[in-house]
Image (spheres, helix red, strand yellow):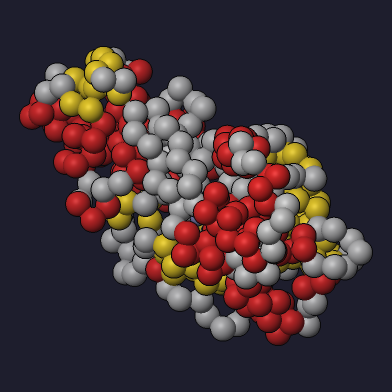
């Protein structure tokens, strides 16, 4: 995430969860669930009731505390968590889909249906599966459940993937996994869940007794979807549209031009006819839908300009070299490099940068 407030007074994405649910739009309940990630104090889970029970959008992290808070907030308004029949994940980031594992583990006789984009979590699921398959399971047969749990914590926290800019992703902190995996397999905390229903762009599903159109909006993540109810002018924005923070752009992507995809995804939102409110995954709902989409676009145009300036100063450099000048030191790391790479690739694809390979990593020259 990069900071960009557009003059808004406070960053609502940072706030700690309130201890009551609120109606964010007619028939849509906003439940703030606890997370502590850089710049983020909560994740919004949205709940809608219909005659079959409850549908949830983005049920938060997989830890037991989150599940308990979710159950409590629902119960405050007379809803029982055992009545959840559907969970939608807007995209495959663990603070959005983790809670699905706990919901699926509930013994209600009616397993929760899981919705996400057709490509939901494919890359990470395959990487975890390859890692798990490479484990010699015969050595686990004689171990106790606690030993197996401990072993899986080590395995799941060891995964590192090679990025397109030639580095490796950071492994997941084992102690955090331990904290979150009380009573649940460490595998389910991080491995994106299997979908029971895959969404295609333009597909319409019923949630809370209303039709919602899935809008595939790659950029923040390849598999990101927003859900759009035209009649009410309501958009579930996920991490594609946040109120004061500009969403992170993932360069770790199957798309040739992830930033270009993000621009197209913003344009789609700006062009929605009759959009009155965005219900984001972090921060307060907002109503200046088109202006916000344009402001986020402008931010990235400014970042591209900054890279052009940096390029004339530093000459031929790997992604890291650009990242260190584009981001403040406290932000350096995989996410900053990922976003820098997406911007450098945009410049290359638009004829403003040349790329060469040096020691197996791309290097860029802008002049
Ligand atoms: Zn995300
Ligand atoms: Zn998020």
Residue at 53% of width from left, 61% of height from top?
Answer: 177
Decide: is 169 above or below 277: above
Residue at 79% of width from left, 43% of height from top?
Answer: 197
The C terminus, quarter of image: top left
Residue sitting nearer the eye, 320 or 201: 320
Decide: is 151 above or below 106: above
Instruction: Name, please, the residue furthest toward the left.
Output: 313
Choose top left, top right, bottom left or bottom right for residue 29.
Answer: bottom right
Q: Is 320 on the left-hand or right-hand side of 180? A: left
Choose top left, top right, bottom left or bottom right for residue 149.
Answer: bottom right
Choose top left, top right, bottom left or bottom right for residue 169.
Answer: top left
Please provide percent x and percent y for residue 62.
61, 63
Q: Is 202 on the left-hand or right-hand side of 341? A: right
Question: How many numbered circles are shown?
Answer: 0
Q: Is 150 on the left-hand or right-hand side of 29? A: left
Please provide percent x and percent y for residue 18.
52, 80
Please provide percent x and percent y for residue 245.
38, 56
Residue at 38% of width from left, 37% of height from top?
Answer: 168
Q: Residue 75, can we see it? A: yes
Residue sitting nearer the eye, 4 or 329: 329
Residue at 78% of width from left, 77% of height from top?
Answer: 79
Residue sitting nearer the eye, 93 or 297: 93
Decide: is 182 above or below 288: below
Q: Residue 13, can we see it? A: no
Please provide percent x and percent y for residue 37.
42, 62
Q: Is 273 on the left-hand or right-hand side of 338? A: right
């Amino acid at each position: 995430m990069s900071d960009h407030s557009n003059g808004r007074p406070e960053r609502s994405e940072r706030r700690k969860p309130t201890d009551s649910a609120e109606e964010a739009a007619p028939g849509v309940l906003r439940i703030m669930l606890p997370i502590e990630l850089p710049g983020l104090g909560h994740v919004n889970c949205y709940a809608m009731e219909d005659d079959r029970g409850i549908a949830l959008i983005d049920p938060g992290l997989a830890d037991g505390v989150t599940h308990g808070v979710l159950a409590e907030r629902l119960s405050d308004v007379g809803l029982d968590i055992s009545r959840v029949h559907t969970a939608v994940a807007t995209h495959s980031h663990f603070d959005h889909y983790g809670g699905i594992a706990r919901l699926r583990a509930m013994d209600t006789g009616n397993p929760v249906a899981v919705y996400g984009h057709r490509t939901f979590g494919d890359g990470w699921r395959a990487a975890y599966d390859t890692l798990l398959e490479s484990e010699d399971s015969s050595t686990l047969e004689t171990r106790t459940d606690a030993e197996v749990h401990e072993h899986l914590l080590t395995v799941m926290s060891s995964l590192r993937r090679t990025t397109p800019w030639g580095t490796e992703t950071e492994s997941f902190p084992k102690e955090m996994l331990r904290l979150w995996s009380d009573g649940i397999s460490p595998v389910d905390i991080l491995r994106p869940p299997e979908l029971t229903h895959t969404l295609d762009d333009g597909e319409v599903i019923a949630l809370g007794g209303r039709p919602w159109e899935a809008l595939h909006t790659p950029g923040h993540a390849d598999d990101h979807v927003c859900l759009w109810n035209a009649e009410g002018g309501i958009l579930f924005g996920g991490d594609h549209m946040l109120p004061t923070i500009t969403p992170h752009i993932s360069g770790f992507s199957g798309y040739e031009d992830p930033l270009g995809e993000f621009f197209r995804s913003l344009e789609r939102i700006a062009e929605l006819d009759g959009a009155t409110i965005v219900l984001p995954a972090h921060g307060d709902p907002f109503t200046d839908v088109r202006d916000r989409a344009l402001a986020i676009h402008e931010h990235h145009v400014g970042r591209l300009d900054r890279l052009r300036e940096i390029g004339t100063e530093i000459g031929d450099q790997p992604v890291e070299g650009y990242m260190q000048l584009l981001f403040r030191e406290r932000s350096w790391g995989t996410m900053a490099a990922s976003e820098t790479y997406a911007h450098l690739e945009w410049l290359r694809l638009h004829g403003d940068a040349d790329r060469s390979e040096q020691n197996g990593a791309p290097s860029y020259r802008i002049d």
